[in-house]
Image: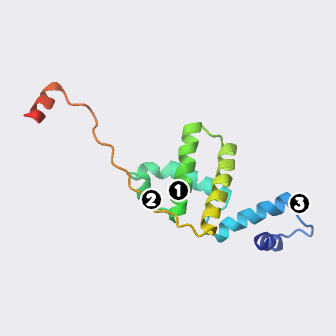
Amino acid sequence: VNAGMRVARRQNRPFLPSPGQFVAWCREEASVTAGLPNASELVDMVYEYCRKRGLYPDAESYPWKSNAHYWLVTNLYQNMRANALTDAELRRKAADELSCMTARINRGEAIPEPVKQLPVMGGRPLNRAQALAKIA
């Protein structure tokens, strides 16, 4: 409630918001006080990650601001790719993920660091001569 009141005081409107708008303000402000972006900033971070991810060998090497940002963005990116989410669907999922992560942080749960994944080994299969040379 205090978070929603802070947002209400910043508004230049002389009227009180609807209950739904007030609850949305409370949720948005709660994520900001937990050190997380709001939903639209999170979607922007996902799109920026989409643009720049090819510049880094893996997601763990990307310059994340916090561990929570890594988990939020990579989960949303994976969900977006797997389910072909539209922008509106991505924004809804971002709000859901943000509320879950905010709740985890407010409970005092430690957000784990990104875990390095094993590199993809292999490439092209060996031809017969190379395979025999490797055995001998």
**Separation (CA) of disc 3 from disc 1:** 33 Å
Whichever of labels 3 and 2 marks the residue nearer the N terminus, that label is 3
Point 51% across, 58% down: residue: 70
Please name which of the two marks, 3 or 2, marks the residue nearer to the observer: 2
**Secondary element type, mark 3:** loop
Residue 10 vs 41, above or below: the answer is: below
Point 46% across, 50% down: residue: 53
Q: Position of residue 12 (x, y in %)?
A: 85, 70
Residue 37 in view in this figure: no
Q: Are marks 2 and 1 in contact (CB under 8 Å)?
A: yes
Pointer 1: residues within 10 angstroms few (<14), some, or many (20+)?
some
Residue 121 vs 57, above or below: the answer is: above
Which residue is under mark 1? 71
Which residue is under mark 3? 18
Whichever of labels 3 and 1 marks the residue nearer the N terminus, that label is 3
On screen, residue 33 versus residue 5, left or right, reads: left
Amino acid at the residue labelled 2: Pro
On the rendered image, what quadrant is the C terminus found in?
A: top left
**Secondary element type, mark 1:** helix
Pointer 2: residues within 10 angstroms few (<14), some, or many (20+)?
some
